[in-house]
């Protein structure tokens, strides 16, 4: 049975391939090539990927990611499609699903929504619920820097408090859009 992470991985690879290496993304000043290198390094180079979260390791991450970005673009896409090596923790289905479902969804949207004439994609209810479950668990971490109280609410009324404070802003949307909002893509969510 296919997992959400596996499906989003393949979608991300397809979007990166069709966009081309120099296509813009919503990630800082990254092109599709830069984003592809980030995904590959995150799964294949634990020695460098720590720089994503640990600032003193950020320079190493940037150097290794730049090295990967120099590889042929088709090779990067193939590395994303085939997934992590067997010795990577990401090769375990449970870790892949927990770590990559949201990562790949957000990055797929980073590629899609940076292109002209994009349209919001309709998510199947099971996947929307999976995104919501992950958002519920991560909301306080994602909302910690909000200058006001922040509540995320689905159209059916289910809510999660991302940040306590006053005044309170309530953002209402489908789980995929709320996920993008919480991950800093407010301009396109």
Image (spheres, helix red, strand yellow):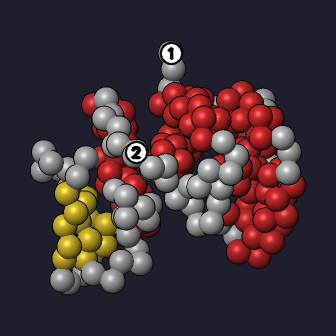
Q: Nearer the viewer, residue 41 or 138?
A: 41
Please provide percent x and percent y for residue 143: 38, 69
- In this rendering, is residue 122 above or below 162? above
Q: Residue furthest front?
A: 116
Residue placed at 62% from the left, 50% from the top? 23
Q: Residue furthest top?
A: 1
User: Which quadrant of the view contains residue 74?
Assistant: top right
Residue placed at 52% from the left, 43% from the top? 108
Q: Nearer the viewer, mark 2 or mark 1?
A: 2
Q: Which residue is mark 1?
A: 1
Of the image marks 2 and 1, the number of the one nearer the N terminus: 1
Residue 88 horizontal side relative to residue 28, left or right: right
Which disc is residue 105 wearing?
Answer: none
Residue 60 horizontal side relative to residue 114, left or right: right
Mark 2 to mark 1 CA distance (whole Å):
30 Å
Q: Is residue 105 visible?
A: yes
User: Which quadrant of the view contains residue 66?
Assistant: bottom right
Q: Which residue is mark 2?
A: 118
Assess disc 1: are there few (<14), some (14-19) or many (≥20) residues with their C-alpha within 10 Å of its C-alpha.
few
- In this rendering, is residue 132 above or below 165? above
Residue placed at 59% from the left, 31% from the top? 14
Q: Nearer the viewer, residue 147 or 110?
A: 110
Which structural element holds mark 1?
loop
Residue placed at 42% from the left, 61% from the top? 185
Please provide percent x and percent y for residue 12: 57, 37
Assess disc 2: are there few (<14), some (14-19) or many (≥20) residues with their C-alpha within 10 Å of its C-alpha.
few
């Amino acid at each position: 049975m296919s997992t959400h992470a596996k499906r989003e991985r393949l979608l991300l690879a397809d979007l990166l391939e069709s966009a081309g290496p120099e296509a813009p993304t919503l990630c800082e000043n990254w092109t599709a090539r830069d984003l592809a290198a980030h995904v590959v390094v995150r799964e294949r180079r634990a020695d460098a990927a720590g720089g994503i979260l640990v600032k003193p390791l950020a320079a190493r991450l940037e150097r290794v990611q730049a090295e990967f970005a120099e590889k042929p673009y088709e090779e990067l896409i193939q590395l994303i499609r085939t997934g992590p090596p067997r010795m990577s923790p990401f090769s375990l289905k449970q870790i892949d699903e927990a770590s990559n479902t949201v990562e790949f969804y957000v990055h797929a949207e980073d590629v899609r929504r940076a292109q002209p004439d994009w349209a919001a994609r309709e998510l199947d209810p099971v996947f929307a619920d999976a995104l919501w479950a992950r958002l519920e668990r991560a909301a306080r971490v994602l909302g910690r820097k909000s200058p006001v109280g922040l509540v995320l609410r689905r159209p059916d009324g289910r809510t999660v408090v991302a940040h306590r404070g006053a005044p309170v802003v309530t953002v209402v949307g489908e789980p995929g859009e709320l996920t993008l909002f919480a991950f800093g893509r407010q301009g396109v969510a």
